[in-house]
Image (cartoon, grey):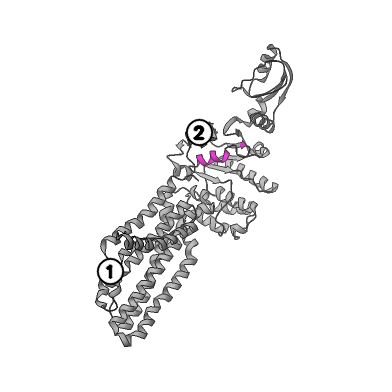
């Protein structure tokens, strides 16, 4: 538990009969960059809001640095920087004024970081927030988050509305932040390339359920797509078999470990193995999420 | 930080109200200039005093309502609540900091208005100012507290400061009318903030010695408590609100 920056167990949020988040069990190690993937409406923002104490869970528990999100909101927020999904800040304030406003909340605030990221991200500091482009508005919020000296950065789709060059600058800045200060970054996105570029861990959420959580290295070395032809083959999912899609006599299995052993088991049941393929994060995402439809 | 933000939001209206208040504070002196020959110094002073009392009882509550419409309710309306409420401070901190910023502003306004108006009147009519005289402004200040609190609370309930202001303005118009109707039809006296003003108010010009009448104690205490309860209820509501 102490090695985890974020840990949730059975975390659930319902709105009426609708499950926004359903029994979520996340484990985000300290010092990791964790990509939280999911389609729009998958429950990513609701999860983030529960982690920040903005929304109360209906059931289950969530801890940030071992602290309960419901009972210890303020100590958590002292160590957490956040960039929201809707990049709305005070419209009449300039970036300089927003820095002035935010600085006093955090003893760990770094003016040197403000200068560094303002230069790096080319932010017009004297312009009113409402007059900035969408991209620059996002950059201002990122600047505030990165200058806070936080142990945990929670970023809700941080690269939305940014151009590719700025995305690249930002991803490098995030990687540097992890290396310099050993902070943890938990960011939600549906940009799989970004997660593959800087992430160490990925979790895939769909319809409020966590479909997969793994190290990206494990995905590369262990995860396989097995296509088998046969009749009455197993369709149960487990910690080994993440998804099964059946199309006529063809079975498509996403296997998380021991793919060869699993394929051998299928052969024993009369299946002929058509293919065993490596999977990229994108392919896993598509396999898991499509299956859920 | 948040105090600075609240001040930054309301400072333009604060300067407008300050200007208006000081201009209105000069009116009683000019009235005394015209009437002192006919009415004598004491009655002229009493007339000027009543005008000042009336003007401050209008400006301070209006300023209170205007300032009460800002603060955390507007954070929801402008969708900045997520940004604010992820700062490591409690909801209580934000509610009461906003309240303190508003309160200090309308107290400064009323203070400036009374200081200018009363000093000019006292100087023109040669009537020394006493603490009892100055206490006559207390109901206006409590009214400002009350309307600022009610506006703030309604703003939080509507999640929109402007709607809070309109709701509060509606109450200011409808509530005294409702009290009058109930009293006229059924002879039932509903508790009203106007009870804070002494009943002798209307006879003060003819009997200037009544100027030293103190405002009734219990209505003032009661409505002060209601005024304080409003931000407290707003805090409780916000603590149960999901963003």
Q: Position of residue B221 (x, y in %)?
A: 29, 59
Provide the residue span drawn in magenta: A37-53
Residue A230 shown left or right of residue B33 in the figure: right
The residue wearing badge 1 is B199
- Check whether the beta carbons of the residues at disc 2 and disc 1 lie within 8 A of each other: no
Q: Quadrant of the C terminus of chain A?
A: top right
Query: Is residue A78 found left or right of A283 in the rendered image?
Result: left
Of A37 and A41, which appears nearest the observer? A41
How far is disc 2 from disc 1 in space, using C-alphas? 62 Å
Looking at the picture, how far across and down is residue A258, in whole percent?
64, 20
Q: Is residue A235 left or right of residue A55?
A: right
Instruction: Give the chain letter at badge 1.
Output: B
Residue underneath mark 2? A11
Chain on which label 2 sits: A
Residue A227 in percent (x, y) is at 72, 21
Residue A145 vertical placement versus B135 (above, below): above
x, y percent for residue A126: 59, 61
């Amino acid at each position: 538990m102490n090695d985890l920056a974020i840990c949730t167990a059975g975390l659930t949020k319902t709105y009426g009969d609708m499950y926004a988040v359903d029994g979520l069990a996340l484990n985000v190690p300290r010092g990791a960059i964790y990509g939280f993937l999911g389609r729009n409406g998958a429950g990513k923002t609701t999860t983030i809001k529960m982690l920040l104490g903005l929304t109360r869970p209906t059931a289950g528990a969530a801890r940030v640095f071992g602290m309960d999100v419901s009972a210890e909101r303020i100590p958590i927020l002292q160590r957490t920087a956040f960039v929201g999904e809707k990049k709305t800040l005070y419209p009449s304030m300039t970036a300089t004024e927003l820095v002035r406003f935010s600085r006093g909340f955090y003893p760990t605030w770094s003016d040197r970081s403000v200068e560094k990221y303002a230069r790096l991200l080319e932010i017009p500091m004297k312009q009113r927030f409402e007059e900035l482009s969408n991209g620059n508005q996002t950059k201002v919020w990122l600047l505030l988050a990165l200058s806070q000296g936080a142990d945990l950065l929670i970023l809700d789709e941080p690269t939305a509305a940014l151009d590719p060059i700025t995305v690249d600058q930002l991803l490098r800045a995030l990687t540097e932040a992890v290396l310099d200060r050993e902070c943890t970054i938990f960011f939600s996105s549906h940009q799989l390339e970004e997660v593959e570029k800087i992430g160490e861990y990925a979790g895939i959420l769909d319809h409020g359920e966590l479909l997969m959580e793994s190290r990206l290295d494990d995905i590369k070395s262990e995860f396989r797509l097995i296509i088998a032809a046969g009749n009455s083959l197993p369709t149960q999912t487990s910690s080994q078999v993440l998804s099964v899609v059946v199309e006529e006599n063809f079975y498509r299995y996403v296997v998380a470990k021991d793919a060869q052993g699993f394929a051998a088991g299928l052969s024993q049941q009369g299946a002929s193995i058509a293919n065993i393929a490596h999977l990229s994060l994108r392919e896993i995402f598509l396999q898991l999420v499509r299956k859920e439809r | 930080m948040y105090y600075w933000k609240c001040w930054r939001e309301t400072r333009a209206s604060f300067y407008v109200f300050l200007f208006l208040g000081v201009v209105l504070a000069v009116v009683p002196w000019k009235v005394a200039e015209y009437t002192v020959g006919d009415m004598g110094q004491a009655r002229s002073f009493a007339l000027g005093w009543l005008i000042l009392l009336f003007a401050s009882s209008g400006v301070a509550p209006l300023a209170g309502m205007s300032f009460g419409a800002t603060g955390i309710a507007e954070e929801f309306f402008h969708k900045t609540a997520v940004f604010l409420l992820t700062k490591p401070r409690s909801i209580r901190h934000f509610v009461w900091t906003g309240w303190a910023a508003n309160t200090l502003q309308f107290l400064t306004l009323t203070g400036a208005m009374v200081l200018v108006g009363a000093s000019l009147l006292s100087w023109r009519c040669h009537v020394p100012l006493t603490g009892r005289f100055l206490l006559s402004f207390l109901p206006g200040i409590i009214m400002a507290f009350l309307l600022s609190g009610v506006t703030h609370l309604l703003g939080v309930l509507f999640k929109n400061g402007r709607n809070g202001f309109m709701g509060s303005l509606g109450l200011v118009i409808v509530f005294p009318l409702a009290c009058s109707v109930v009293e006229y039809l059924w002879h039932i006296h509903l508790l009203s903030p106007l009870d804070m003003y002494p009943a002798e108010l209307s006879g003060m010009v003819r009997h200037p010695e009544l100027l030293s009448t103190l405002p009734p104690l219990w209505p003032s205490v009661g409505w002060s408590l209601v005024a304080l309860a409003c931000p407290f209820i707003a805090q409780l509501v916000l603590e149960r609100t999901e963003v």
